[in-house]
Amino acid sequence: MARIAVVGSGYVGLTTGACLARLGHSVTCADVDVDKVARLRGGGLPVHEPDLDGIVASACAAGRLRFTDDPAAGVDGAEFVYLCLPTPRRADGSDDLSSVTTAARTIGPHLEPGAVVVTKSTVPVGPSHRVVEALGRADVAVVSNPEFLCEGAAVADFLRPDRVVVGSTDRSAARRVAALHAPDGVPVVLTDPVSAETTKYVSNAFLATRLSFCNGIAALCEAVGDDVDDVLCGMGHDRRIGHDFLRPGPGWGGSCFPKETDALLAIAADHGFDFRLLRHAVEANREQFDRVVDKVTALAGGSVAGVRIAAWGLTFKADTDDLRGSPATEIVRRLADAGATVCAYDPTVRRPPRGLDVEIADDPYAACEGARFLVVLTEWDELRDADLGKVAELLAARNVVDARNLLDRDELRRLGFTYRGIGRS
Ligand code: UGA
């Protein structure tokens, strides 16, 4: 079992550290955020991620997981050091690597001779040389090991990955990194660093494109009077297509798809390639937000000005508290900008997100009181199972725009609702 340090204790770093400890390694998670580290030491998690709290607690109790706010001390004695740091998007669309390079400069002098540094942060294709330069250590191998964790399923994705991709000019270091956590039988792709980083970007870009295509099918179904559920079911049974990522919705979002599709377009453009298919997938996604707003506006008779609307869900998908790049908040913003009063309920949101003109309700029913429309934006199970009879009583008018096709439309119709889903005629 290896001695491992993980620098950065956000959702990727914490999941990586806790799961490596669960596999039996001895792990130190470091973060410069003193408050976050204090909270972690007290058993609190900075992110909402199913199953992660239990894994963190048992790894800490077993003495295999500890936290420090001093990254330089955290890497002391570590054979492997994971960099799991944010790479936010700058105003010009490029990724800001300063957290990664600052951390590399900090830990460089403190690394054990022959240590292996593993970059998990999603970094623009080709910058591993910047990490190497910032580390300033010729005796240390740098390996790119992109993460493919889905928020809300990160623990399962780490412990049972579909594949492990490791890129390095040092094949032996790459093999050692794969051996740390790749379960038996899982495909391991050993490659160069640039190909590993590209694999991460194109996987997300492909899934985002697939969803834009899927939302396009939904719009087509509405136009011709088909039912998207049957069409996608029939399509997904083709083994070459499969059923995953075929749920139409309000558009795709999150901290990864929007940022990485933009970054891939920029990388392509920098190299003289206009990736038109991907550009259109990104444009189609913005149109999908419009489509949801248009459904509400049309039902309201052409304007939502002065109309009270209940919104169910604010996070970018269920089982996360992440609001970054959320289609739900974007749609709420557009409705509020058009003059509506929006009251939202989300199981993980207790106060209005900064800059969003929205009231926050304590439960799904309180959000509905006196509203003329219910708009479903995130697919929380709690909302799927809501008492629709009670909702009907509380609303001032029985109108539902279900941007996740979450609710039972037959039941809603029985209750006298006017129902609009996505791709359902
Ligand atoms: C995504 C990738 O799926 C992960 O493999 C990757 O590791 C991660 O980004 C990352 O780069 O770190 P995540 O951002 O957690 O994971 O979210 P997804 O589950 O992929 O969902 C992305 C968006 O697509 C969400 O807005 C979601 O609601 C939407 N979606 C997803 C649909 O509208 N329909 C679907 O069928 C699936």
Image (cartoon, rainbow, N blue to C red):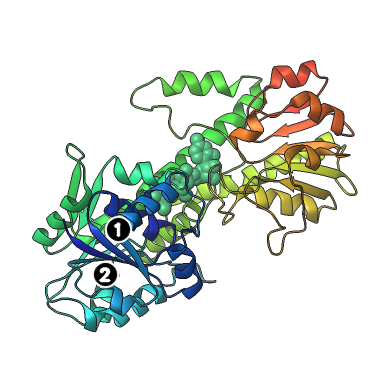
Asked if disc 1 and disc 2 are in contact, CB closer than 8 Å, the reply is: yes
Specify the farthest residue to the front.
61
Amino acid marked by disc 1:
Glu
Depth check, front residue: 399 or 227: 399
**In the picture provided, is 157 more to the left or to the right than 402?**
left
Q: Is residue 358 above or below residue 221?
A: below
The numbered mark at residue 128 is 2
Rounded to the nearest angstrom, the CA distance separating label 1 from label 2 is 9 Å
- Give me the residue at 41% from left, 77% from top: 98
Horizontal side of residue 134 vs 318, given as left or right? left
Q: Looking at the image, which residue is at 53% across and 32% down?
A: 247
Name the amino acid type tagged 2.
Answer: Ser
Q: Nearer the viewer, residue 238 or 81?
A: 81
- Residue that carries the numbered disc 1 in the rendered image: 197
* Residue appearing at x 32%, y 51% in the figure: 19
Q: Kindly indicate the quadrant of the structure image that contains residue 395.
A: top right
Give the class, few, some or many, for how many residues have Cα within 10 Å of label 2's Cα (few <14, many ≥20): some
Can you say which quadrant of the picture contains the C terminus?
A: top right
Position of residue 276 measured from the top left corner of the image (x, y, whole percent): 45, 50
Q: Is residue 76 above or below residue 54?
A: below
For residue 422, say whether it is visible. no
